[in-house]
Amino acid sequence: MSVVLISCVKEKKSYKCKAKDLYNSTWFHYAWDYAQSLNPGKVFILSAKYGLVDPEVEIGPYEDTLNTKTVREIRTWADTLLTSLQEKTDVINDKFIILAGEKYRRYLVCRLVNHDIPMRGLRFGQQLKWLKEKCAQ
């Protein structure tokens, strides 16, 4: 099974709603559409505050990011996230497609046997262009 992991973004709606609808940025919308175009078995959102989030679960807006966390805090976040992934996926046999920046994936990908990072090395503007092109196909 393929599993897409999409990172959260700073821009959020001001009210509680399904996670897939909470994140309110062009990048997130393109990432979501691209993920859906892959027809994956599952899609999850990587939230700095909530960890691994099912897109259908309602959550409220928050201000949290891995960019302000220490290495130790990020490692702890990744450990918790991996535990959640192990409960919801087959981390050995599933293929993980990761649409997330370096801080969100650094301590996670080394523990996922089969993963792809299609936008590795692309800066934000390049990611946005890449996603837009993929969604237009």
Image (spheres, grey):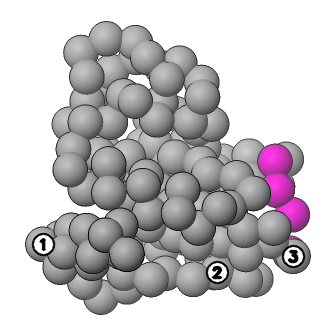
Residue 89 within the segment the image draws in magenta: yes
Q: Which circle's residue, 1 or 2, is located before the other in the chain?
A: 2
Q: Which circle's residue, 2 or 3, is located before the other in the chain?
A: 3
Quickly name the residue at label 2.
115
Quickly name the residue at label 1.
125
Q: Are marks 3 and 1 in contact (CB under 8 Å)?
A: no
Residue 114 image point, x, y percent = 73, 83
The magenta segment is 88-92
- For the stretch drawn in magenta, what is the main secondary structure? loop
Q: Name the residue at the bottom extreme.
A: 121
Q: Establish if 50 lies above or below 26.
A: above
Front of the two marks 1 and 2:
1
Q: Is residue 114 visible?
A: yes
Q: Is residue 77 visible?
A: no
Question: Toward which corner of the image does residue 79 lie, by quadrant?
Answer: bottom right
Q: CA distance from mark 1 to mark 2?
A: 23 Å
**Element at badge 1?**
helix
Quickly name the residue at label 3.
93
Q: Establish if 94 lies above or below 53.
A: below
Residue 15 image point, x, y percent = 31, 11
Residue 76 image point, x, y percent = 57, 52
**Element at badge 2?**
strand
